[in-house]
Image (spheres, rainbow, N blue to C red):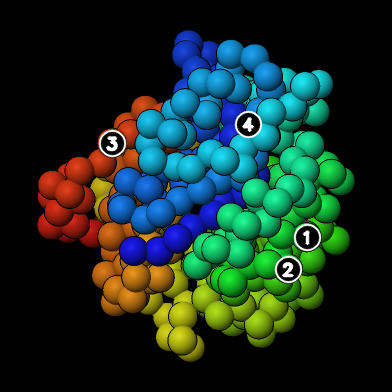
Amino acid sequence: MIKATCFGEILWDVFPTHKKIGGAPLNVAIRLASMGNEVGIISRVGKGKKGKQLIQFLNENAVATLAVQIDEQYKTGKVKVTLDEKGSAYYDIMQPRAWDNIQLTDAAITLVKEADIFIYGSLASRNEVTANTLNELLKFANYKIFDVNLRQPHYTAAVLENLLVQADFIKFNDDEIYEVATLLGSTDQSFDHNILFIAEKTKAKCICVTRGSQGAVLYIDSTFYYNSGYHVEVVDTVGAGDSFLATITSKLMNNDDPQEAIDHACAIGALVASREGANPVITAEDITNLIGTSTL
């Protein structure tokens, strides 16, 4: 098993009728830990009850919280989530929040140095304090995984380019890869050509793109691997991409076959989308049953 450190926002997803614990780094960390990996997270919460509940949830799910900081001024993260008729999620991300103020600490540096992989996203860089902390921590990372995870208006071209060129592994969704490829100068409309273009521009060792119900594409060791998706009834898409990333990361870093890795990751992403919230329990039987069905 691997040692992983996740960095960035941990928060409450507030739906019209209920609320759930979330944040992409938290979702990735929880899923990685559920697979037996050793996982820690670097973030910041408010000093009240909501922050304590987040820390307790992480601890209960075997994610180390030594580097989760307590902020005396800013509140714990909160996102208002709305779902369309297909279950696709739209986000109103409150600011400023505690995770906008993550400080560079010895605990955070140690966690990054000792990890096999360091996973980060673009959203945490919307504030200069957290962005500066991330840039410093990247200097200590052994293997850097960038979960692009674009959320308008919380990113700039300069921030994205800086984070892209430092990554060993980049994960996009199908909208993000075209936006980023255009940003870097591509005029090509071919999906695979844009993956190759970004790989050349960034020197990333691995690129993965999720395509919703159409599965995903993985480019690693100069080879493409594809999965065309699994049919499920979508409840909500919150956290599906995070569980996909955690799964494919765990599989690849534990030296599993790339095709098996992408098949397994697509199955777990689909299962998460078929259930409420970002962190449903997924069993081995659930995965086996879904993979055993016909792909779309």
Residue 136 is labelled as 1
Badge 2 vs badge 1, beta-carbon distance below 8 Å: yes
Mark 4 to mark 2 CA distance (whole Å): 31 Å
Report the residue at 28% width, 36% height from top.
281
**Mark closer to the observer (4, 2):** 2
**Mark closer to the observer (1, 4):** 1
Mark 4 to mark 3 CA distance (whole Å): 23 Å
Residue 281 is labelled as 3
Frontmost residue, 95 versus 212: 95
**Amino acid on which disc 4 is placed:** Tyr
Instruction: Say whether disc 4 or disc 3 marks the residue closer to the N-terminus.
Output: 4
Q: Secondary structure at mark 1?
A: helix
Mark 3 crowd level (few <14, some 14–19, many ≥20, 10 Å Cα)? few
Frontmost residue, 123 versus 143: 143
Instruction: Say whether disc 1 or disc 4 marks the residue closer to the N-terminus.
Output: 4
Q: Is residue 296 above or below residue 261?
A: above
- Across and down, in percent, residue 97 comes to 75, 28
Instruction: Say whether disc 1 or disc 3 marks the residue closer to the N-terminus.
Output: 1
Report the residue at 77% width, 21% height from top.
72
Residue on which the image places disc 4: 91
Residue 189 visible within the image: no
Mark 1 to mark 4 CA distance (whole Å): 28 Å
**Amino acid on which disc 2 is placed:** Lys
